[in-house]
Amino acid sequence: MKLVFWNVNGLNDSDMPLSVARETDADVLVLAEYEGNIGVLCQSLRKTGSAFSSIPMPGCEKISVAYKQGRGNFSPRSASERSSIVYWEQLGNVPILLAFLHLPSKLHRSESDQRHSATLFKNEIESVEKGCGNFNTIILGDFNMNPWEQGMVSTDAFNSLPCLETAKKETREINGERYRFFYNPTWNLLGDFRGSPGTYFHKSPGVESHYWNMLDQVIMRPSIADRLNKETFRVLDRAGDLNLRGSGGRPGISDHLPIYFELDLRQETIHGEPLG
């Protein structure tokens, strides 16, 4: 499965998302802040030879999702203004939960507010996991936090770690309560060794400024993490002839750059052990 997430910052035409979907051959295209008609975008995608449909997510205003028909069934399980959770299954593949989100920005909320939002959504995820009996959860979206911030690493929030070996311990105990880990591979996209040093550029007027930030992230339960094709996981700065970066290499078409990754969900063994 090939997935793309992109915060398009109010884009209202289909040309740019179409170029990204076509270049990546995406099976699932997730857009935040898309002001265009997702149905029209799906029609445009069909003209390229791939039949696409949108996932209905009543009540979710910040996220739009298009998926390639024939790539499994997507069943909505939960939705709010800024998030949605769907159950995905396809014969011969490991079923998963896919969660999409766009959390509030620091421009309007404090770090404590962001942590609170993360905690609430994590609780919703756990409720859906228990209801489905499926803990193969992947969350992608605009977290509006960097990987090291409280809402990402605190045990009562996403409790996400950059080390899979540690995350595979599954839980951490604090004051007698156990908290399930997420694995956060997005740490590996920080810096300039491989392509863009982040997905979002902001020069703070204060004494502390990271300039480049990784607000757009993917986190996943350790049970599904071995299904990630690490070589494909990257920030996109081009889509064919379309340059997604502008002046000084900063994001150009939107104020965010897209992220792309692939999952191998075939029902088979990996490293000699069954995953399912």
Image (cartoon, rainbow, N blue to C red):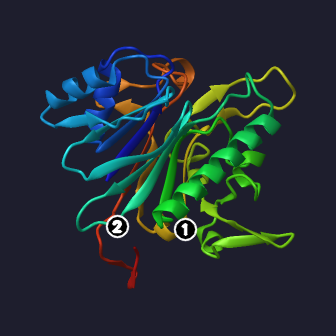
Assess whether mark 1 and mark 2 are in contact (beta carbons under 8 angstroms). no
Q: CA distance from mark 2 to mark 1?
A: 14 Å
Outermost residue to the bottom: 272
Residue closer to the observer: 99 or 190: 99
Q: Which numbered tag is attached to residue 222? A: 1
Query: Whole-percent x and y of residue 185?
Result: 56, 56
Secondary structure at badge 2 equals loop
Whether 94 is drawn above or below 248: the answer is: below
Q: Report the amino acid beneath label 2.
A: Val
Residue located at (25% from left, 53% from top): 72
Side of 142 where 244 appears, left or right: left
Location of residue 234 in the rendering, given as x and y in whole percent from the top left corner: 46, 46
The answer to whether residue 241 is above or below residue 174 is: above
Disc 1 is placed on an element classified as helix
Which of the 4 image quadrants contains residue 82?
top right
Instruction: Give the total of numbered labels.
Output: 2
Say which quadrant the C terminus sits in: bottom left
Which residue corresponds to the image point at 63% horizontal and 46% vertical from the top-left?
Answer: 121
Instruction: Kindly identify the residue that appears in the image at 16 percent across and 30 percent down.
Output: 46
Q: Nearer the viewer, mark 2 or mark 1?
A: 2
Q: Nearer the viewer, residue 26 or 134?
A: 134
Which residue is under mark 2? 94
Q: Mark 2: few, some, or many residues within 10 Å (few <14, many ≥20)?
A: some
Would you identify the image quadrant in which residue 191 lies?
top right
- Between discs 2 and 1, the one toward the N terminus: 2
Compared with 145, 32 (above or below) is above
Q: Nearer the viewer, residue 244 or 4?
A: 4
Residue 272, visible in the rendered structure: yes
Q: Name the spot of residue 83 as percent of width and height, x first.
A: 54, 38
